[in-house]
Amino acid sequence: PDAILLKPGKLDPAEWEIMKTHTTVGHQLLSGSASEYLKTGATVALSHHERWDGTGYPQGLVEEEIPIEGRICAIADVFDALTSARPYRPAFPVEEAVDMLREGRGSQFDPHLLDLFIENLDRILAAKRRAEQGDPDDR
């Protein structure tokens, strides 16, 4: 619900439990599709909040038990969240967001995939700018 997503302060325990259901709800909505894209989306929906060290949700998967799609999306999701303005805070500068991602290396994020993300950050940011401008060319 928007009241939770846009809440300016910290979520209370009941709100947090509601927020966490988006992984399983998204998985349920997408998993019945015949489309391979939507099946991949179902995997991402279910696993993008799992953490490399096993402390994530909803299943508490650890390391390579987490589907690679979810591990990739976890990094992209956090980077996007950090570099986007929220009702309760301004966007972090890219350099600060990268430092915050590095703090999660090997605990929150797959260390190898995080290294690849950072190594390719210029290309990722260029693709993001093109997407925001409506340019589908990702070369």
Image (tube, rainbow, N blue to C red):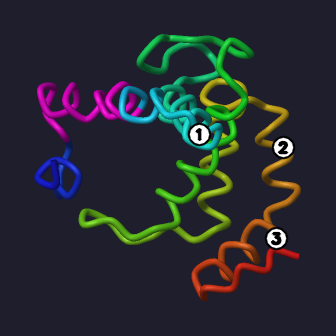
Crowding around mark 3 (Cα neighbors within 10 Å: few <14, some 14 to 19, many 20+) is few
Crowd rating for badge 1 (residues with CA inside 10 Å; few <14, some 14–19, many 20+): few
Q: Earlier in the sequence, mark 1 or mark 3?
A: 1
Residue stretch in magenta:
11-26
Whether residue 72 is in magenta: the answer is no
Q: Which mark is residue 122?
A: 3
Nearer the N terminus, badge 1 or badge 2? Answer: 1
Disc 2 target residue: 115
Residue 59, position as x, y percentages in the image: 46, 11
Q: Nearer the viewer, residue 133 or 105?
A: 133
Query: On residue 35, which mark appears?
Result: 1
Tell me which secondary structure the magenta stretch mostly adopts. helix
| Residue 12 highlighted magenta (yes or no) | yes
Judge left or right: residue 3 versus residue 108.
left
Residue 76 screen position, x and y as percent: 62, 51
Judge depth for marks 1 and 3 and give the one in front.
1
* For residue 100, above or below residue 36: below
Query: Which corner quadrant holds the C terminus?
Result: bottom right
Label 3 sits on what residue type?
A: Asp
Mark 1 vs mark 2: give the one in front: 1
Find the distance from the CA under tag 1 to the CA under tag 3.
32 Å
Residue extending farthest to the front is 34
Find residue 58 and report its horizontal and vertical position in percent: 41, 18
Q: Is residue 66 left or right of residue 48?
A: right
Amino acid bearing label 2: Asp
37 displayed left or right of 28: right
Q: Is residue 113 left or right of residue 82?
A: right
Q: Is residue 75 above or below residue 93?
A: above
> Residue at the location (48% across, 35% down)?
45
Toward which corner of the image does residue 95 lie, by quadrant?
A: bottom right
